[in-house]
Image (tube, rainbow, N blue to C red):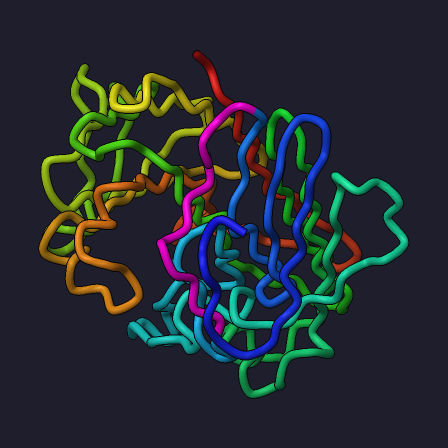
């Protein structure tokens, strides 16, 4: 185990295949870490992982579903709880029928969620859904969230695979492939739309951006001498985030300075990119991580 885990007794699965290793928590269907053979961890977790029912796990790959934080009802902004949705603070059902050790499947349906929480979807009724989360662990890591509409009316949802990627030093990290892309800068008043210049995305302070991009991206890490490749499908946007020194050191579940060791690059369907699913239909949002040297 690469780090201590504190909290209630919860199932954490240690996966070892010929080409990689990983740890996955049934709580949140949460990939805690993943590393190809002969590589340091690519999916990052802090030095201590806290598992507490009702609270999200820091690091790894939290599943944001079916909303981020705010919705809009009758023209007014309305906060939704739990923040970033119930997906990352729910116990997902592990599918024992999947025979491949490197392929994990988790399931979550509306039956496991209280109707008062589901009513926050904001469609005037209680949505009925079935979600399947497939994790394929090998030389690359693929995570795919499929949401099926099991009801008789359409509904819309937001989602993200909030992937923390390990870097040697955030000052030496850059995201390539977003040059010229439009993005929402959530660090500025009124969340303006900004256009990325011809330079790569660097991290000299708080960065919290929603890019309108479906392209495959590369996170170049000069400190560790490697490039992490991030490809996605079914996601109209990409979030790039690092809290910076002030916010990072204020996070109670991070040790001082740990904010320097990760960059989040994540497949997202957010705000005007929310996904609408008709009755009997489904949508899959996926992300694949690999390493180039």
Is-magenta flag for residue 49? yes
In the rendering, at what x and y percent does residue 228 appear? Answer: 42, 24
Q: Position of residue 144 (x, y in %)?
A: 64, 43
Numbered circles on residues, count? 0
Residue in the image at 51% along x and 45% along y: 33
**Front in this rendered view, residue 237 or 106:** 106
Q: Residue at x 31, y 39 (%)?
A: 263
Taking depth in this image into account, of 40 and 212 the one nearest to the observer is 40
User: What residue is at 68 percent from the left and 66 percent from the top?
Assistant: 92
Seen in the picture, residue 175 relative to 192 is either above or below; the reply is: above
Q: Quadrant of the C terminus?
A: top left
Q: Nearer the viewer, residue 76 or 127?
A: 127
> Is 221 situated left or right of 91 in this image?
left
Q: Which secondary structure is most common in the magenta stretch?
A: loop
Extreme residue toward the top, this view: 293
Q: Locate residue 4: give its quadrant.
A: bottom left
Measured from the top left, where is residue 97 in percent x and y? Answer: 90, 54
Where residue 252 sits, quadrant-wise, is bottom left
In the image, is residue 55 part of the stretch drawn in magenta? Answer: no
State which region is magenta.
Answer: 38-51
- In this rendering, the answer to whether 139 lies above or below 60 is above
Residue 74 vs residue 104, the one in the foreground: 104
Position of residue 176 in the picture relative to residue 153 (left or right): left
Q: Does residue 248 appear to the left or right of 157 in the view shown?
A: left
Residue at x-position 45% and y-position 54%? 3
Q: Is residue 150 above or below residue 33?
A: below
Q: Position of residue 111 (x, y in %)?
A: 73, 78
30 left or right, relative to 184: right
């Amino acid at each position: 185990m690469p780090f201590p885990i504190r909290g209630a007794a919860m199932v954490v699965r240690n996966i070892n295949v010929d080409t990689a290793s990983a740890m996955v928590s049934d709580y949140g269907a949460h990939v805690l870490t993943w590393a190809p053979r002969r590589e340091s961890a690519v999916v990052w977790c802090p030095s201590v992982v806290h598992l507490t029912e009702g609270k999200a796990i820091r690091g790894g790959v939290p599943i944001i579903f079916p909303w981020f934080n705010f919705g809009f009802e009758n023209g007014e902004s309305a906060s939704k709880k739990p923040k970033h949705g119930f997906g990352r603070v729910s116990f997902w059902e592990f599918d024992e029928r999947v025979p491949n050790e490197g392929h994990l499947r988790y399931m979550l349906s509306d039956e496991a969620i209280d109707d008062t929480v589901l009513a926050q979807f904001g469609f005037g009724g209680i949505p009925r859904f079935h979600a399947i989360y497939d994790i394929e662990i090998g030389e690359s890591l693929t995570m795919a969230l499929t949401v099926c509409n099991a009801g008789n009316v359409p509904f819309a949802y937001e989602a993200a695979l909030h992937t923390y990627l390990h870097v040697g030093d955030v000052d030496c990290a850059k995201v390539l492939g977003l040059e010229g892309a439009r993005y929402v800068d959530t660090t500025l008043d009124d969340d303006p739309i900004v256009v990325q210049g011809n330079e790569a995305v660097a991290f000299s302070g708080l960065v919290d951006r929603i890019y309108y991009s479906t392209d495959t991206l590369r996170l170049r890490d000069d400190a560790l001498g490697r490039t992490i490749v991030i490809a996605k499908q079914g996601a109209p946007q990409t979030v790039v985030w690092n809290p910076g020194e002030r916010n990072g050191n204020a996070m109670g579940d991070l040790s001082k300075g740990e904010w320097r060791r990760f960059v989040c690059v994540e497949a997202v369907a957010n705000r005007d990119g929310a996904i609408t699913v008709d009755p009997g239909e489904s949508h899959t949002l996926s992300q694949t991580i690999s390493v180039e040297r």
